[in-house]
Image: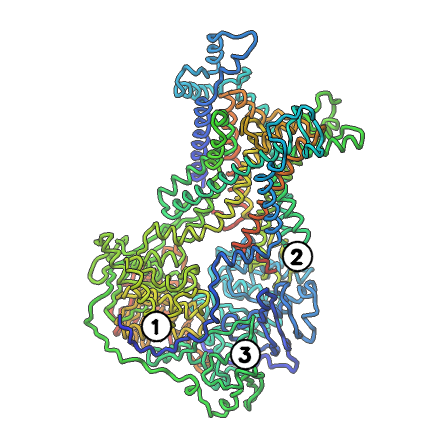
Amino acid sequence: MTETLSTNQSHPPAEAPILEVRDLTVTFPNHKGDVKAVRGVDYEVMPGEFLGIVGESGSGKSVSSMAVMGLLPSNARIDGSIKYRGRSLLDMDDHEMSKLRGSEIAMVFQDPLSALTPVYTIGEQISEGLLLHDATMSKEAAHERAIELLRIVGIPGPERRVRAYPHEFSGGMRQRAMIAIAIANDPDLIIADEPTTALDVTIQAQILDVLQKAREITGAAIVLITHDLGVVAGHADRIAVMYAGRLVETGPVEQVFARPQMPYTTGLLRSVPNLATAGTQRLVPLEGKPPSLSNMVPGCPFAPRCPIAIDTCREVEPELIGHGTPGVAAACHRADEIASGELTAGSIFPRPEPVQKRVKNGDADRVLEVTGLQKHFPLLKGAVFKRQIGTVRAVDGIDLEIREGQTLGLVGESGCGKSTTIGEVLEMVAPQKGKIVINGVDVSELSKRDRLAMRKDVQVVFQDPMAAIDPRLPVGEVIAEPLTVHKVPARKRNDTVAEMLELVGLDANMADRYPHEFSGGQRQRIGIARALVTNPKLLVLDEPVSALDVSVQAGVINLLEDLRDSLGLSYLFVAHDLAVVRQIADHVAVMYLGRIVEFGASEDLYDNPQHPYTRALMSAIPVPDPAVEKSRERVLLSGDLPSPTDEITGCSFRTRCPLFALLPETDQDRCARDDPQPRRAESNLVACHFSERIHELEHSS
Amino acid sequence: MGKYVLRRFVNYFILAFIATVTAYITSSAFMDPAARYRGQNPPLSESSIKSILDGHGTNPDVPILERTWTWLTKIFLHGDFSTTVHNNPVFQEIMTRASVSLKLLLIGSILGAILGVVLGVWGAVKQYKASDQTVTYASYLIIATPTFVIGVILMIIATGFNRLIGTSLIRFSGEYTADIPPGFFPWFTDQLSHMLLPTLALVLMGAATYSRYQRSVMLDVLASDFIRTARSKGRTRKTALVKHGVRVALIPMSTYFAYAFGTLVAGSAMLEVVFSWHGMGEFTINSILQSDINAAAGSVLFIAVLTLISSTLSEVLYAALDPRVRI
Amino acid sequence: MATEIPISTTADTDVVTPRSKPTSRLTLIWRRLRSTPRFWVGGIMLGFFVLFAVFGNTINIYSPTDQDIYALNEAPNAQHWFGTNTIGQDIYAQTVAGLQKSLLIGIIAGPSASLLAAIIGSTAGYFGGRIEVVIVWFINLLLVLPAFFILVLLAPMLRQLSWMAIVVFLALFGWMIMAQVVRNQTKAIKDRDFVKAARYMGVSTPRILSRHIIPNVASILIVDATLGVVSAILTETSLSYFNLGIQKPDVSIGTLLAEGSGAAVTRPWLFVFPAGVLVLMLFAISLMADALRDAIDPTSGANRD
């Protein structure tokens, strides 16, 4: 599918903006000092326009849009003005606002599971919005319209699905239903608050398409709030970057992405791993964390993280003004220098050099060998009357191998069995079926004592550092915990902890601080330090950067690369983000429904993916470059991950396979009949009968 | 599903059985049924006491296990739950008294639950406002008061009230008046006048605990995303809370109902004694005070069955309220 | 391990928040408690009643067993602050003595029940499997046999033992519902990343339980122990009211109320004073428990509207 700007032209921007936000401030009273979540934000949205608001967590992007909807908690102090078609929204009471909400301004929320009322059917929840704004509409008519709306947003079998409850929908389908609710009354403005953050990439691509379609149908302007620059690049006309409660840069996407004028935007753009360049060059870290919004110091809030900050930056907060480029405004004292080209992106955030060139040794010892690993769960249903209704084949016979000093990336959507796989490896007990061999020792033959000793060699870093670190312990104790297990004396422990802290780029004297004093990126470094403290051979990294803000991801990935290369570690790197994996992995295994569907060396797999699923996954990842995004061809997957109870004969991917749809019937029969075994295609191992025809996908779209 | 219901019932049957047998054995071990006959005037001979006890199956000379076995075979073979110390069949006695207790328990717990839910929701919505504080303090005051004290206080108030209006409008002794004129209306008003105080006491007790729980559940629900969604669709805060919030906040209450039921049964038993109702509560307490083993075991069976019915009900209610647990 | 490893990543040490004294959880809880009026109302009231129970009789010339035959059935006056009963016993002295006993029973029985709940519940939740099935079944059995009725049944035996027997039985039959709560919490915490991390590091099971699980359920246990004091006292009072609990010569509020309730209308002081003291004290404890719960779990009261 090719994205074009044609939709734009069907709604030429009218003169008057549909939404005008002027000097908006939102303050939450707090006994420790008021939290100024939004500090003077100005923007407008033209009819039919697609505006992307980008920012990290805590930047105020969601709060400012909630203020527009009038959905902020009652203790929030809101100042400034918000005008919708010239009417002041801040002067309206809840009753007046409720007439506007859902009919003229609609909203799509982040987490579609909690955003839908669990006890009403999808149909009831769509009809509700219709009936509220049209007193003349009959219940039957609303029901019919709900079915129609579900069809529009691409829910198969809407006549049946309209009676389903939210928990019977998958995440992607729920978000489609949310969009159906939003467009029900043909609104003029849709605010979408991180609508795809909770979803897998392939589903994200679908939902963004639905959102575009909704815009075409209703002609509504869309404000898309996200932290993902790639999402904005592909869909928005204009971008607004928020930092510490203010807009720091706005402008048309093409201009802002190509020539950012605010160093924060530059840093963000350079720090994101890019599928096109990943693995060939190092990431540019943007370290530090946004300032606390309760006790703001004077000056530019980005100054402490900004490599080109000058004295003025620490004294005066810059205004959001134009710097010579029409339509672009940036809040930076040095934006003129940047705009004129005196300061280039490369000179602001120089790309760090790798520590040393790594020589990949194909004959190094195997640290981890997994053969035919299987883990099936009974699937139970009903909280009151439990019964088994099927078997979840979480892991269904997979082989993995990691050699010393190398990284294996394991990628796949949620529910594919990645987490179960690493759980099995880390438990170090005999699996249901198959074999796990660590350092040449079969774990099923380990004695209790040997297993404890082996735990030294295999350590783990979890996704969310806040969840994986006990918040009640000072970080020194957190890091030393594995050593206490192995009875290392206290004095030695303290030395090692100091050493580890320095190793991960923290200060050795921070050992007595508590986790809450650290930023997200630093906490993950603490998690890494804890994993390294026993001097392990293999680190299992379970989505180690996906819970971090984009700007700090790069620093952690670089650290992991350095540690591997200097300490000779091996990684089992589990992630859903293919760009991150490409950056760090030597080999990549793509998992789908408990199976490895493609395995190969990183370069081969990324340059020439042979399995249609790999191809679709890679194509679903948005690239933070509007020029690339709007011209590239994409392979979209249809539908969701099948339910674990579905018995799919033959190839388990065929229900969503874009290639399957193109095959003649006789070949389709083969997919439905035979379970494809991994075989060599090009230089990869591929579980697909027809991977030779993979290139047909490109010509079809 | 039938299989699961059946399994559940078998499990319940076993629980009730063990509970009752445990009750029978412990009361046989600790009670001295002969004591009540020894102090009688004219004195009864030891042998005639023993023969009376043999009639009840409670002769301490017979080993406990043997007595238990006899007691059980009578139940399972003849449906005979033996007799009370007053020579009434235990089963019949329970049947007569159960209606008295259930009348109080049913009306009291249902009204208490409804009032508690309403107050809890109201308190959550008005969190920390004066009305919420009042309800909070009042419910803690009630929770801190022993049930019989509530009963006695209500009696004192009713006495004052009756004195004030010069007639015994509120009656608080017994379950009905003996000599009421025939007809439905006099019967009905008499029932009302007798039921008012004990029911009120039970309702207060139930409403106080339910409202605390409902309030905290409702506070959780208030912070949910779906309330925000409902408002984004065009509902006002108030209607969003009622239509979406309350409906969801009712779900955990169904589970809580089963937990709170035991307290209510104990409370209503005490109220029966305080208000001189001849129900199961009085029966149970008297059975112990009179060392009546058969009656005590029967009482425990009654309570066990009641508890099991209530927990089944709460599960059914849970499934009815929450589509996520339906099969 | 080598320390001389060049790390190219810039460390973000400079943005650590200015060195603040590490706020421990206890400090945080205390800070939140301090700002809750309910805590102060409850705390001050409770403090008063504890002082009253401990020192109340040192300022009174009558002891609970004294019989003032010149003052039978007297209303409260300067001599007998709470009045006297039919045999001239001083109600004030008896109330203080009863309160002492009731408080003692509650303070021992309530927390003991919570301790039982913690041990049994966390064991069932952490180990799962057969152990859990057996424990849950046993809990269900005890719930079918309501605690109050078991106590009533066993009362004849308790009568022959000291009042401590009542305390033991109150604890033995008061842990079941809380154990279920602890079990569910434990099951949830068991799957959290920091417990998994500890397990994969090889931390032993007792250490995981004591260092990671129990501290995390401790907060609800503290609240439960507080409310357990209330329910233990209430149960004891009710038992004694039906002459099934504390036996003479021991006095508890329950036995006083049993004697006084018959005369509640004609000689209200026999009933109103002991009842009032008891209710207000339990009220104070409940308020503190409620404030404690809000302070320990700040999300429980979050109203985002």
Pointers 1 and 2 in contact (CB under 8 A)? no
Q: Residue at position x 64%, y 30% from top?
A: C90
Could you say whether the residue bearing mark 1 is in a helix, strand or loop? helix
Q: Residue at position x 49%, y 21% from top?
A: B293
Which residue position is annotated with label 3? A240
What amino acid does circle 1 point to?
Glu
The mark found on residue B61 in the picture is none
Which residue position is annotated with label 2? B238
What amino acid does circle 2 point to?
Lys
**B207 vs B82, nearest the viewer:** B207
Could you say whether the residue bearing mark 3 is in a helix, strand or loop? strand
Pointer 2 indicates a residue of which chain?
B
Of circles 3 and 1, which is in front?
A: 1
Q: CA distance from mark 3 to mark 2?
A: 34 Å
Pointer 3 indicates a residue of which chain?
A
The mark found on residue A502 in the picture is 1
Is residue B137 placed above or below B59 in the rendered structure? below
Pointer 1 indicates a residue of which chain?
A
Is residue A253 placed above or below A524 in the rendered structure? below
Residue A236 shows in this picture: yes
Circle 2 residues within 10 Å: few <14, some 14–19, many ≥20: few
What amino acid does circle 3 point to?
Ala
The image position of residue A211, as x and y in percent, is 52, 70
**A111 vs B2, nearest the viewer:** A111
